[in-house]
Image: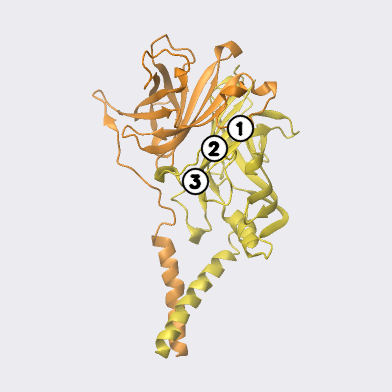
Amino acid sequence: MFRTFIVGSVLGFFGTGALLYFVPVVDLHRVPSQISVQTNGGNFEVFSVSLPGDRIMSGDPVASMRVPAGLAWPESALFGGFKTELFKIRNSDDTVIGVGSRIARSEASGNAFVQWVVHLPARGTVYLSMEPSPAPGQARAGVLSAGTREFASLRGSASETFVRTGVEGGGEEGADNEGRIDLRLTLMAQQDEAE
Amino acid sequence: MKYLVSLVFGLVFGAALLFAGLYLNPFASKASVSPLAVSDDELVVLDFSMVPSESILFTNNGDSVRSPNPLKVQQLWEPAIEQTWVSVVELSSARGEPIGVGVKFSSTSEATRPLNAEALVDSIWHVYLPGRGTLFVEESENYWHFLRDIVIPARWSSSDSWRASWHGITTAGPGALRTARVVGQTGEFAGVRAEAVESISASAYSANEGPVAMSGSLLIAVPKSSDGKE
């Protein structure tokens, strides 16, 4: 009987070890790919944010514009010239696949910039730098500044478009908070050439 | 029958022996000295609180011991992001002066390997320091020692809490020296490629509420040659 116990102990020790080695402890949820191939090389993918539903946070210098209720945004003048937002990010199938942050400093505050970080847990993260002042009616253009994991070896461009939805006439007061932000990424593999 | 019972006890004993070995593993040493400590580059220190209620915003799937803050913030319950948590914090200098804001995204990593003493988290920082510029920080963090030294003792404690003084470096990559990768984009950080290390200093933790007295520090070594203007 003691021999059986010893055999069981050895089996338990190495069996558990094998289980920990071969069975992943973390298994992130994945959804079918929505990537499309570009005609001239590379591929593109569209991410979207439905507003106001997907807005997690709006850190705005103006207290009445802050989301969610009760957000204690710092009142210091240091935090007065820019806006920090957090969103849930959807794929073109309208499924939430990640979260993203957008930090924007306005022209009025000087040194304007608009940046996105889109974090997709199962795939990686992209860091986008957008032009601060697009022409009226035009999409805001930008570039991929950095990427992690599956985006680490890619380069490319991005565009940000705000599409008003659900409001007749489009330009009504208060309509700025309802609509959809489309982020279109056009990516291709980096060449070996020195930058 | 007695052989079967003996075998089952043996299996349980063997598994327990393995877990005890992993928990007490003397070869899994905690890093507490930054590899950037001897750097000649300018060191930017960004301190922040890791207590959710002291953050500007903290959100997760709502099932963790750490409660979202503010209470009405959206939770990350969707399947693709339920193992992700986000915190927005006010960043302070080493002298305690507010110098910016940081958004930190963290997701459990599929590279986690308990046999290697690794409980990995993929983390991303989006940092803005008004007057200086913006930074993107990519890192893989190892919370094994944090779990072993703080979280598990807190759960075992009859008071469901842990109190002591603990300091450890969580950054475990992707840099060769177990440093984080930093990309600067605007201002004096424009075009900067740098390294960073994140550390935790804790003195109180509750098994029911999470961190009670805990702060983090992001140490970034910025090459001196970067002289862009915001």
Q: Position of residue B6 (x, y in %)?
A: 45, 85
Q: Quadrant of residue A69?
A: top right
Report the Cα–Cα distance between label 2 and label 3.
11 Å
Q: Secondary structure at mark 3?
A: loop
Q: Which chain is orange?
A: A
Instruction: Please give the name of the residue rendered at 23% of the width and 24% of the height, measured from the top-left corner.
Output: A39
Residue neighbourhood size for the residue with mark 2, other residues' Cα within 10 Å, grouped as few (<14), some (14–19), many (≥20): many
**Residue ID for mark 3:** B61
Chain B drawing hue: yellow
Q: Position of residue B56 (x, y in %)?
A: 62, 35
Label disc, if present, on residue A71 of the rendered structure: 1
* Image: B192 above or below A27: above
Whether marks 1 and 3 lie on the same chain: no
Residue neighbourhood size for the residue with mark 3, other residues' Cα within 10 Å, grouped as few (<14), some (14–19), many (≥20): some
Q: Position of residue A70 (x, y in %)?
A: 61, 33
Q: Earlier in the sequence, mark 2 or mark 3?
A: 3
Q: Position of residue A160 (x, y in %)?
A: 41, 21
**Residue ID for mark 2:** B73
